[in-house]
Amino acid sequence: MKTLGVVGAGTMGRGIAQLALQSGLSVAMNDADPSALERARSAVEAGLAKGVARGKLSASDAGAALSRLSFARELHALAACDIVVEAVFEDLALKRGLFAKLERLVPAPAALATNTSSFLVSGVADGVEAKDRVVGLHFFNPPVAMRLVEVVRHPGTGEAAWAGAWDLALALGRTPVAVKDGPGFLVNRVVRSYYLVAQRLAAEGAGTLTELDDAMTAQGLPMGPFTLMDFIGLEVNLAITKSIYEGLGRPARLEPHWLQEKLVGMGFKGVKSAAGFYLYLGGRKDQENPAAVSLLPRQRRPVPAGTVFRRVMEAVRAEAELMVEEGVASSKDVDTAVELAMNFPEGPFAWGRHAAQA
C-alpha cells in the first residue's frame, strides 16, 4: 500500500492524512471546497512541526512527509489510490452520492472506506452498486494520537475491501479491531451505560456530580462520566445516545436521560460553551453548574463510592456481553477497544474477571 486517498479536509480528514504521511504513505486529498485544502495543508504542516518539537519526528522526516501530500482538485484524480477514506460532513445523502461517484472514478480493487460515526456502513453502501468494495474505517479523534481503529464489516463487505482496510490500519501503526456493522459500532455503544447509569444515580440522589465522577476516577479511570460528557460535548454525546437507542429498537436500558436532555435544551454544551454539568473558566473545570444541580434532588441518599463504581461497570459489562452474543465483536476486541479508546485501565470483561476473584 503506497497511496491513500482522503475525501474531506476537515478535522478528521486532515488528521488521517497526517497520520498516513508520518507512516510513509503518499496522500491525495480532495475536498469540494478548495479553501479547505489550503487550510488542511497548513494544519498538517503545523501538526508535523509539533511532532518535531516533541521529538517524535526529525525535521527531515517531517519535510519528506509534507512533500508526499498532494491535492486532488477533482475526484477522478484519486483513481490511482490503493484505498480511499471518506471523512466528509455527517450527512447520509452526501456520503451516498460521494460513494456512487467514487465507485465510478476509482477502479477496483481499491476499497472505499467510510469514517462515519453516525450512520451504518450498510446505509452508506446503499449508494454503491458494488457494495463489496465498501467498508468502515472508524478512526478516533485525534487520529495521530488515538491508537484504535474500528474496522467495520457490513453484510456486503468483500474480503478484498476488508483486508485492504485492515492492512491500512496496520500500516498506520494503529490497532484494528473487527466490528460487525450496527448502531454505535463497538466503543460508542458499549460505553453508553457509563454515561446513562451515572445520570440515573445522580437523579436518585446517590451523590453529587463531583462525588460520582470521583467514584470512577478513584479506580483509575481518566475522567468521570459527567466530566467526559462535558469534554465530548453534551449535545454530541446526547445525539449519539439517541442514535444508538433508536437503532437498537429503543431498549429501556439505553434510553436517553432527561437530565442531559434538559441541559442541552437550556443551551449547555460542556467545555465548548463554558458550561455543562460543570462550569469552566478558561477551559478549566471550576465548579458544578448551578443549573444542573437545581435539577437534582435536594434530599441525598448517598451511595458508597465502591458501589457507584460497581453499578456503572456492571452495566458496561452487561452491554459488552450482549454485543458479543450478537456477534458485534469478540470479548478480546471489546476489552482492547475500551482500553485504547477510553483509556480505562482494563476492559469490561477483564474487570468482570477481576471483580469475581476479589
Image (cartoon, grey):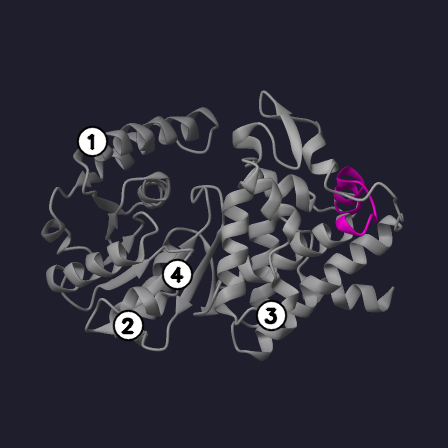
Res. 46 image quadrant: top left
Query: Do tag 4 and tag 3 residues touch (Cβ < 8 Å)?
Result: no
Q: Position of residue 278 (x, y in %)?
A: 67, 33
Q: CA distance from mark 4 to mark 2?
A: 22 Å
Q: Mark 1: which secondary structure?
A: helix
Give the secondary structure at mark 2: helix
Q: CA distance from mark 1 to mark 4?
A: 27 Å
From the viewer's perspective, is residue 146 above or below residue 84?
Answer: above
Residue type marked 2: Ala
**How far is the residue under mark 1 from the one under mark 2?**
34 Å
Q: Earlier in the sequence, mark 4 or mark 2?
A: 4
Q: Marks 3 and 2: which is nearer the front?
A: 3
Residue 355 sits inside the magenta stretch? no
Query: Which residue matches tag 4?
Result: 119
> What kind of element bears circle 3?
loop
Residue 197 in view, yes or no: yes
- Which residue in the protein does label 1 denote? 35
Name the residue beneath numbered marker 2: 160
Q: Residue 98's image quarter?
A: bottom left
Q: Nearer the viewer, residue 105 or 124?
A: 124
Residue at (82% x, 48% y) in the render: 205
Amino acid on which disc 4 is placed: Phe
